[in-house]
Amino acid sequence: MTTRRRGLLIILSSPSGAGKSTLARRLRAWDPSIAFSISATTRAPRPGEVPGRDYDFRSEEEFVRMVEAGEMLEHAVVFGRRYGSPAAPVALALSEGRDVLFDIDWQGGQQVRNSALAKDVVSIFVLPPSIRELERRLTGRGQDAPEVIARRMARSRDEISHWAEYDYVLMNDDLDRCAAEIEAIVTAERLRRDRQIALAEVVRDLNAEFEEMTA
């Protein structure tokens, strides 16, 4: 049975280096119909990042204007730079019946869960297998200076302290298994009774068939 359903707002969070960006890419490869909420940020692009694909790079002035105009679904300051999710692309995807994936931190996740869209949120927090492994991954990326890595490690403790605010908590000690678990969560959440818009209509049609058969 296939019925129309409301879209999901899938929040994927983790401390930096725990693998949420890789898992987000794996989820969209599994189902390309999932829209990705491209975060706006005031930080400069990193090597290899493409504007409009990885991030929506904005000036400080433009970002503040968007916040004041109510154009951000959520926003936060991280390491002195602003990050946020523009609301318009999310609204468009939902109007088309598509799921939307957010690769955001706990602050952003909290704001989305407290928004008018809360009923459609599915939140997933990804833990690293160990703190030593988390540091190894951050160092191995070769993108940040030692002092930046130190700040990210310090922030990780605060990030992990918010694990209990999420619907699901997974450990990324095996990338393939963790990706499969996220796919299973999304599949199950899509099938929830309260997300099936036309389910009552389907049941009415089935009952009508009973009436016809017994008439």
Image (cartoon, rainbow, N blue to C red):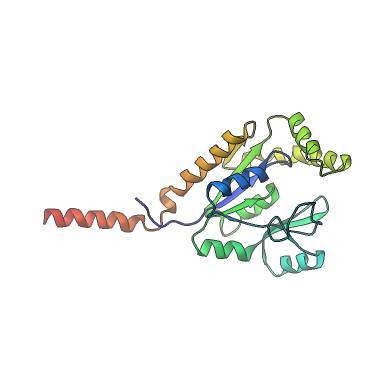
Rendering coords of residue 125 (x, y %)? 63, 41
The quarter of the image holding the C terminus is bottom left
- Residue depicted at 56% across the width and 58% down the height: 117
Rendering coords of residue 212 (x, y %)? 15, 57
**As drawn, 178 above or below 203:** above
**As drawn, 75 above or below 70:** above
Rendering coords of residue 32 (x, y %)? 54, 53
- Residue depicted at 64% across the width and 39% down the height: 126
Furthest toward the left, the residue is 215
Which image quarter: residue 53?
bottom right
- Residue depicted at 48% across the width and 46% down the height: 189
**As drawn, 125 above or below 110:** above
Which image quarter: residue 65?
bottom right
Furthest toward the front, the residue is 48
Nearer-the-camera pick, 25 or 14: 25
Q: How many labels sit on residues?
A: 0
- Residue depicted at 54% across the width and 38% down the height: 180
Nearer-the-camera pick, 42 or 155: 42
Nearer-the-camera pick, 172 or 159: 172
Rendering coords of residue 118 (x, y %)? 56, 54
Left or right: where 114 falls relative to 189? right
Left or right: where 159 falls relative to 175? right
